[in-house]
Image (tube, helix red, strand yellow):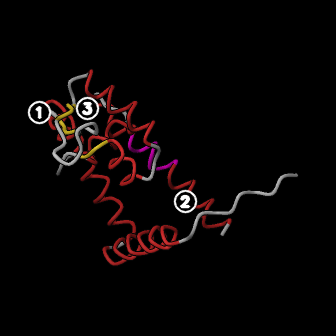
Amino acid sequence: MSRTALGVFRLNGQFLSVSEELARPAGLTAAWWQVLGAVLHEPLSVAGIARAMGITRQSVQRIADLLAVKGLAEYVPNPAHRRAKLLRPTGAGRAAIDLIGPGHAILATRLAEALGDDGFAETVRVLQRLSAALDTLPPMPDSPDP
């Protein structure tokens, strides 16, 4: 378990570093790209984005509000819930994401060459299995007081 966690933590750091590099020319951060990417295909509530990304609602709220102020995203009415508005990218937000596409494609090609198509597909399957297995676990019991 420890080796898996350490490997995933390192991988997360590597992905964040590469994502920052890819997002910078588009005027985005990795976090902004992550939130915009979550709503590219359909508008979502802040809570829905947080669930999809596995991060806190508060951190998504902060980024979503910033994206709206910057004109990269906007809040629209949510037919399913009056108070929980939906976030969707604006034209400027979509244009920024489009600027990341070529660098993203180059990185994907380089990874596919390094891993091989089958190795890349297997890596995705294993990571999805690990994530799904973690989703099925009940919450950890509270730690006993010392």
- Residue shown at 27%/49% (left/top)? 104
Determine whether label 3 and label 2 are within 8 Å by CB: no
Circle 1 Cα neighbour tier, 10 Å, few/some/many (<14 / 14–19 / ≥20): few
Q: Label 1 belongs to which residue?
A: 91
In the image, taking residue 12 as reference, residue 45 lies left or right, namely left
Residue 113 on the magenta segment: no
Lower position in the chain sequence, tag 3 or tag 2: 2
Q: Tell me if residue 32 comes above or below residue 10 in the rendering.
A: above
Disc 2 to disc 1: CB gap under 8 Å: no
Q: Which residues are magenta?
A: 13-19
- Can you say whether 59 is above or below 126 in the image? above
| Residue at point 21%, 32% (across, down) | 75
Q: In front of the other: label 2 or label 1?
A: 1
> What amino acid type is highlighted by mark number 1?
Gly
Give the distance between the C-alpha atoms of the residues marked 3 and 1, in whole angstroms. 13 Å
Provide residue 85's location: percent of width, then percent of height.
Answer: 24, 37
Dot 2 or dot 1: first in sequence order is 2
Residue wearing tag 3: 26
Nearer to the camera, 80 or 98: 80
Q: Main secondary structure of the magenta part?
A: helix
- Quarter of image, res 32: top left
Disc 2 versus disc 1: distance between alpha carbons? 34 Å
Q: Which residue is mark 2?
A: 8
- Residue 86: give x, y in percent of width and height: 23, 40
Q: Amino acid at mark 3?
A: Ala
Numbered mark located on residue 9 in the image: none
15 is within the stretch colored magenta: yes
Judge by depth and name the residue closer to the eye, 25 or 47: 47
